[in-house]
Image (tube, grey):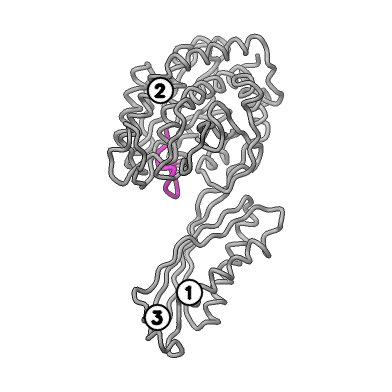
């Protein structure tokens, strides 16, 4: 990686190549839109992406790109081989996720989901189409690629433990050794045509919390004869809020939210059991461990005080996503060359989570926000919403930017 230890220079050569890729991204834009809409019509949940996998496989083969033997039951990994004279041994990876969410679409456009209870409400159809578009662009410029591009179409980003970790465990990086890995995610708060990048800690580690509070049910008119799990649950919800305000340092981002509570089915009956669930988000592993320990202590002590029993299950989710600082600076330079400085923004750290974090534990890389916001942003056009409706012009930006970034990093790695 010594070759990426200095910033790109905005030369006439790179500017000319950026212009050519922009023109090509514009030419194939209608085809990229068609790909996105076909995927959007037929969303598939995590590890069920059979039709999507077949579409990706067939499209890559039509470009002369032979997919690798599968690592997992769904998803596609393929190597686009460059033919530039200085490219031997250089490898850059590009990743898109392909799964949908269990959401019923409420949009009214002509390509709404045909699958009841399933929708691409997080933009993975956009991500997939962008990477296919980048493959189309780069496949026509092989003689100018000074190295190879690894195309990763990953399943199951939406379902813990995600598809990235199993893919790595199945040998992805034993078979391939990319110098850099790049990913992007649709964000409706960033205007279409722009990107936003963040150096260092970018997205949070996420852990799922599951509580069971068991007491003694009884008549609601005689609470003194019961051990009320509803009351105990309410105090537990209140008590765990101190973890962020009094345990986490003020300069360390952290979130603990209880998002669901279930118990009882009659107004005059104290139930015997209450269940709750929630999430914990942190940006650093030391704080993550501390909050888990203190969370258990708090829940057990409050339960004991109210004469009930509590069980707490913490399901470890994705680690914090930490962008490599140097690679991110290089990516900022590449994005600026391609889009212009006015279209490259600095992002603040986010408390959302992404299993792209697992790749960054293994290889240097960066993950950025690709803008999908419309000029008149409509209420409800947010990620994971049944009315999420990204600006499709972002497909042109995203496909071209991925292609240019791959070429630019390979160019740098080759010593130009």
* SS class, disc 3: strand
Q: Earlier in the sequence, mark 1 or mark 3?
A: 3
* SS class, disc 1: strand
Q: Which residue does the image show at 50% across and 55% down from the upper left?
A: 316
Does 126 appear above or below 23? below
Q: Which residue does the image show at 47% across and 21% down from the upper left?
A: 134
Q: Are marks 3 and 2 in contact (CB under 8 Å)?
A: no
Q: Which residue does the image show at 57% across and 54% down from the upper left?
A: 281
Question: Marks 1 and 3, how far apart in space?
Answer: 17 Å
User: Does the magenta segment cover residue 369?
Assistant: no
Which marked residue is nearer to the observer: mark 1 or mark 3?
3
* SS class, disc 2: helix
Q: Which residue does the image show at 43% across and 45% down from the upper left?
A: 385
- The x, y position of residue 102, in whole percent, is 36, 47
Give the magenta part as a residue range: 153-163
Question: Marks 2 and 1, how far apart in space?
Answer: 52 Å
Nearest the viewer among 303 and 139 is 303
**Residue that label 3 marks:** 270
Residue positioned most to the front: 376
**Residue that label 2 marks:** 32
Structural crowding at the residue carrying mark 1, measured as other residues with C-alpha within 10 Å and reported as few (<14), some (14–19) or many (≥20)? many
Q: Earlier in the sequence, mark 3 or mark 2?
A: 2
Structural crowding at the residue carrying mark 2, measured as other residues with C-alpha within 10 Å and reported as few (<14), some (14–19) or many (≥20)? many
User: Does the magenta segment cover residue 154?
Assistant: yes
How many numbered circles does the render carry? 3
Q: Which mark is residue 310?
A: 1
Does 373 appear above or below 308? above
Q: Which mark is residue 90?
A: none
The picture quadrant where one finds residue 237 is bottom right
Q: Earlier in the sequence, mark 2 or mark 1?
A: 2
Q: Main secondary structure of the magenta part?
A: loop
């Amino acid at each position: 990686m010594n070759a990426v230890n200095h910033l790109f220079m905005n030369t006439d050569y790179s500017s000319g190549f950026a212009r050519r890729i922009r023109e090509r991204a514009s030419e194939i834009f209608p085809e990229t839109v068609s790909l996105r809409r076909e995927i959007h019509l037929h969303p598939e949940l995590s590890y069920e992406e059979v039709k999507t996998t077949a579409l990706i496989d067939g499209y890559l083969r039509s470009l002369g790109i032979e997919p690798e033997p599968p690592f997992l039951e769904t998803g596609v990994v393929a190597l686009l081989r460059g033919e530039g004279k200085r490219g031997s041994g250089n490898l850059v990876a590009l990743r898109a996720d392909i799964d949908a969410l269990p959401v019923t679409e409420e949009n009214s456009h002509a390509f709404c989901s045909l699958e009841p209870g399933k929708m691409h409400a997080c933009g993975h159809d956009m991500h997939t189409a962008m990477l296919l578009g980048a493959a189309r662009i780069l496949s026509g410029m092989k003689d100018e690629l000074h190295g190879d591009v690894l195309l990763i179409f990953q399943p199951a980003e939406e379902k813990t433990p995600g598809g990235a970790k199993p893919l790595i465990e199945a040998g992805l990086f034993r078979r391939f050794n990319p110098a850099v890995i790049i990913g992007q995610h649709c964000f409706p708060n960033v205007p279409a045509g722009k990107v936003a990048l963040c150096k260092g800690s970018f997205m949070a580690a996420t852990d799922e919390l599951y509580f069971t509070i068991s007491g003694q049910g009884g008549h609601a008119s005689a609470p003194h004869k019961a051990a009320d799990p509803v009351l105990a649950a309410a105090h537990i919800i209140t008590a765990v809020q101190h973890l962020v305000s009094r345990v986490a340092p003020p300069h360390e981002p952290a979130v603990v939210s209880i998002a669901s509570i279930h118990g009882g089915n009659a107004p005059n009956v104290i139930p015997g059991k209450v269940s709750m669930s929630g999430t914990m988000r942190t940006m650093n592993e030391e704080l993550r461990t501390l909050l888990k320990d203190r969370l258990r202590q708090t829940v057990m002590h409050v339960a004991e005080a109210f004469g009930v029993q509590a069980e707490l299950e913490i399901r470890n989710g994705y680690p914090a996503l930490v962008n490599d600082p140097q690679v991110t600076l290089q990516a900022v330079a590449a994005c600026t060359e391609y889009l212009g400085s006015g279209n490259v923004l600095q992002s603040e750290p986010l408390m959302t989570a992404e299993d792209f974090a697992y790749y960054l534990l293994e290889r240097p890389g960066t993950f950025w926000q690709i803008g999908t916001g419309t000029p008149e942003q409509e209420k409800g056009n947010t990620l994971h919403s049944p009315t999420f409706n990204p600006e499709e012009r972002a497909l042109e930006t995203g496909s071209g930017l991925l292609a240019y970034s791959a070429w630019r990093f390979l160019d740098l790695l080759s010593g130009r």
